[in-house]
Image (cartoon, helix red, strand yellow):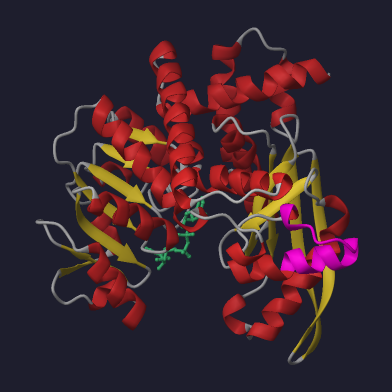
């Protein structure tokens, strides 16, 4: 079986034919990360000192400093971190922001750590990768199981070693230490702006929407869509979901989730499993939870005509091929969930320019940026008669290659 990384880079070969003017070496270089760093670092936990494994993969930096989140999970593998770093290079290029791509991870189960231990792990990881990060070198951010608080500890550790308060080294920080207004909402809101483009381009009338995942991204997407009158008929979290064909009250579900830990306790609505949610007869499906949830087992059962990928990699390569054959329009993750990295870029800009922007300013700039990216991808798709995923790869690789060639 091909690794996730092999699957991820396979698309590079599939789009080569649309970029025939570029030398072979450009495509080969994009298949190889610039640098793979594995660190083994000691951390003092309750039961004694243990040695943890962490990674930082710096995929490409021809367009600017490396940029990408840090994931804490017992499931983290180098293969996964390499794929996520590769997608970040493409995502920053599609968004047309002056960054490259990177990703980091630590193999650790945060559910087994108390707060003091989580702080110790966060600080120790930064000490281990200190030499390779910096505001003009590589700028980490949160990802799965790393929070604003984790970012605050990381900035503090970096600043202590540097002997200089350096907020621009990390984005996704709390506002009190230089975080940006609107970062929390950014990915979901970006997804909502994409929804508005789809509705316009494909002339969708009162589309029905199902959202898998009710965390930061899924909730904010559903909230903005609901506020604008869209009908969200199903949402779910790791425990299951709820359905109502007349539409769900998103704020009510948010309260239930806050109070009880899951949307399944919203007894006002019908229960639904995650499997059923993905296969619902809706117009638009929004996977906003995990990787690989739509795969060769269930792809042929998907009835939605549009998919907005707010999670990273929710469709496997096989599923993508099946859905493409069935003419399902898929807005790929590297475009659909780029709102987060765009507002991270705004945060970094505010830090290095000593500015503070209002939430309205952030939202307005995000709307302009993501709408432009969508339109660039759509134009590319129409020009080459390819899927939005292929088009976004063509656009990203072209943008990276144009600069790479100048530097060769
Ligand atoms: P989160 O931890 O806040 O929320 C994840 C949600 O998924 C939770 O509601 C959880 O219950 C649900 N979930 C977990 N397992 C599930 C399962 N088996 N079935 C259904 N739901 C399940 O995370 P998030 O920040 O919302 O991120 C969600 C996805 O979006 C991830 O793939 C992440 O990489 C991607 N993403 C996030 C951002 C960001 O800014 N937060 C940016 C880009 C991409």
Residue 146 seen anywhere in this rendered image of the structure: no
Q: Where is residue 341 shown, x and y percent of the image?
A: 57, 45
| Residue at 59% from the left image edge and 63% from the top image edge | 175
| Residue at 59% from the left image edge and 43% from the top image edge | 2
Is the C terminus in the top left, top right, bottom left or bottom right quadrant? top right
Figure check: 206 above or below 239:
above
Residue 280 seen anywhere in this rendered image of the structure: yes
Asked whether residue 158 is drawn in magenta, I would say yes
Q: Where is residue 87 shown, x and y percent of the image?
A: 59, 40
Asked whether residue 357 is drawn in magenta, I would say no
Q: Where is residue 289 shown, x and y percent of the image?
A: 42, 58
Along the line of sight, which residue is nearer the eye, 102 or 276? 102
Question: Magenta residues?
Answer: 154-168
To which quarter of the image does residue 151 belong?
bottom right
Along the line of sight, which residue is nearer the eye, 245 or 192? 192
Figure check: 321 above or below 214:
above
Along the line of sight, which residue is nearer the eye, 349 or 282? 349
- Left or right side of 397 for 139: right
To which quarter of the image does residue 384 belong?
top left
| Residue at 72% from the left image edge and 71% from the top image edge | 153
**Number of marks drawn:** 0
| Residue at 89% from the left image edge and 65% from the top image edge | 161
Q: Where is residue 145 shown, x and y percent of the image?
A: 57, 68
**Where ligand 1 lies, by quadrant?**
bottom left
- Left or right side of 269 for 285: right
Q: Residue most toward the left? A: 246
Q: Residue most toward the bottom? A: 47
């Amino acid at each position: 079986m091909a690794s996730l990384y092999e699957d991820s880079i396979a698309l590079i070969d599939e789009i080569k034919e649309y970029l025939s003017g570029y030398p072979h070496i450009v495509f080969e270089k994009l298949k190889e990360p610039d640098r793979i760093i594995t660190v083994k670092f000691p951390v003092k936990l309750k039961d004694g000192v243990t040695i943890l494994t962490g990674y930082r993969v710096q995929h490409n930096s021809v367009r600017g400093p490396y940029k990408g989140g840090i994931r804490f999970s017992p499931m983290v593998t180098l293969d996964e971190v390499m794929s996520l770093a590769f997608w970040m290079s493409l995502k920053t290029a599609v968004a047309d922001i002056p960054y490259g791509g990177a990703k980091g991870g630590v193999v650790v189960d945060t559910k087994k750590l108390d707060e003091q231990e989580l702080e110790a792990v966060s600080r120790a990881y930064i000490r281990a990768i200190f030499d390779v990060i910096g505001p003009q070198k590589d700028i980490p951010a949160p990802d799965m199981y790393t929070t604003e608080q984790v970012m605050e500890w990381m900035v503090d550790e970096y600043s202590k070693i540097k002997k200089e308060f350096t907020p621009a080294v990390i984005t996704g920080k709390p506002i009190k230490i230089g975080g940006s207004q609107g970062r929390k909402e950014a990915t979901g809101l970006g997804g909502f702006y994409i929804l508005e483009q789809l509705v316009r381009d494909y002339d969708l009338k009162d589309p029905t929407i199902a959202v898998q995942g009710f965390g930061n991204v899924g909730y904010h997407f559903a909230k903005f869509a609901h506020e604008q009158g869209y009908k969200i008929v199903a949402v779910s979290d790791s425990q299951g979901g709820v359905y109502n064909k007349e539409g769900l009250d998103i704020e009510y579900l948010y309260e239930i989730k806050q109070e009880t830990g899951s949307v399944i306790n919203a007894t006002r609505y019908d229960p639904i499993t995650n499997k059923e949610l993905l296969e619902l007869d809706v117009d638009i499906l929004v996977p906003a939870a995990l990787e690989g949830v739509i795969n060769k087992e269930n792809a042929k059962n998907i009835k939605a005509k549009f998919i907005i990928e707010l999670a990273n990699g929710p469709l496997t390569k096989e599923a993508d091929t099946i859905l493409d054959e069935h003419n399902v329009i898929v807005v790929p993750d590297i475009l659909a969930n780029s709102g987060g990295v765009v507002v991270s870029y705004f945060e970094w800009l505010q830090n290095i320019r000593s500015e503070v922007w209002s939430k309205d300013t952030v939202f307005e700039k995000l709307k302009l940026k993501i709408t432009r990216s969508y339109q660039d991808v759509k134009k590319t798709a129409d020009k080459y008669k390819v899927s939005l995923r292929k088009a976004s790869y063509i656009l990203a690789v072209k943008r990276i290659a144009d600069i790479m060639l100048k530097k060769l």
